Image (cartoon, grey):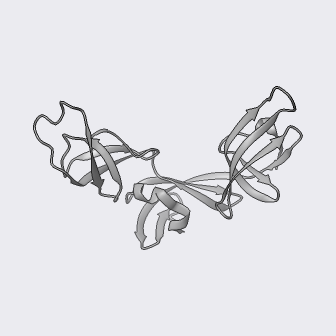
Amino acid sequence: MATLGITDLKAGLGVNIKGRDCVILEAQHVKPGKGNTYVRTKYRDIRTGRVNEENFQQSAKFESVNMQTREMQYLYNDGDLYYFMDNDTYEQIEVGIDMIGDNAKWLKENDACLLNYANGVLYAVQPPMFIEVEIIETDPGFKGDTVQGGSKPATVETGALVQVPMYLNVGEIIKVDTRDGKFVGRV
């Protein structure tokens, strides 16, 4: 493991902070008019999932953490457990809803997801950046709805609620950005 200084800190980097493996979420270098340079960081403790904010002085040193990303296929869920399969080894793993969190509403069977590991411990599940889903419930669209350019809520097949243009109806397939839950376009 390499030793890192504060200038090496950036989002997505795995480091050991105070004996705990963490992933940097945000790192902002601050150079005040008076005083020493420091880095304002926001990081997630991999074991507990807790997000912390802390400032580190220029002299701070960190040990890097071995980070891995594996692409796996989402198979199905059984209550609070979600099952994924590695397409190379056909190994199946189960992941609890607490690990997936809010991303569960973007998981669609047979889609490829990224599972992030730090020192062999799973800490995050990322759904695909864009998914194609069917609208299963929304108010009907009428002729002339496109004139004003408004939007309406629609429930998609994964259970997520997405704001869509007024002209879309039940049964249509749409593309959604899973990072912010916004409608991208019709498929």
In this view, which residue lies farthest toward the right?
59
Q: Residue at x 66, y 62 (%)?
A: 121
> Does residue 92 appear in this view?
no
Where residue 67 appears, as percent x and y from the top left, is 68, 51
In this rendering, position of residue 145 left or right of residue 7: left
Is 51 placed above or below 59 here? below
Where residue 49 appears, as percent x and y from the top left, is 64, 61
* Of residues 134 and 94, the one drawn nearer to the viewer in this rendering: 134
In this rendering, position of residue 75 left or right of residue 26: left
In this view, which residue lies farthest toward the bottom?
79
> Does residue 105 appear in this view?
yes
Q: Residue at x 81, y 43 (%)?
A: 56
In this view, which residue lies farthest toward the top?
33
Q: How many marks?
A: 0
Is 80 placed above or below 102 here? below
Is 95 placed above or below 113 here? below
Is 3 placed above or below 32 here? below
* Of residues 121 and 92, the one drawn nearer to the viewer in this rendering: 121
Q: Residue at x 82, y 59 (%)?
A: 19
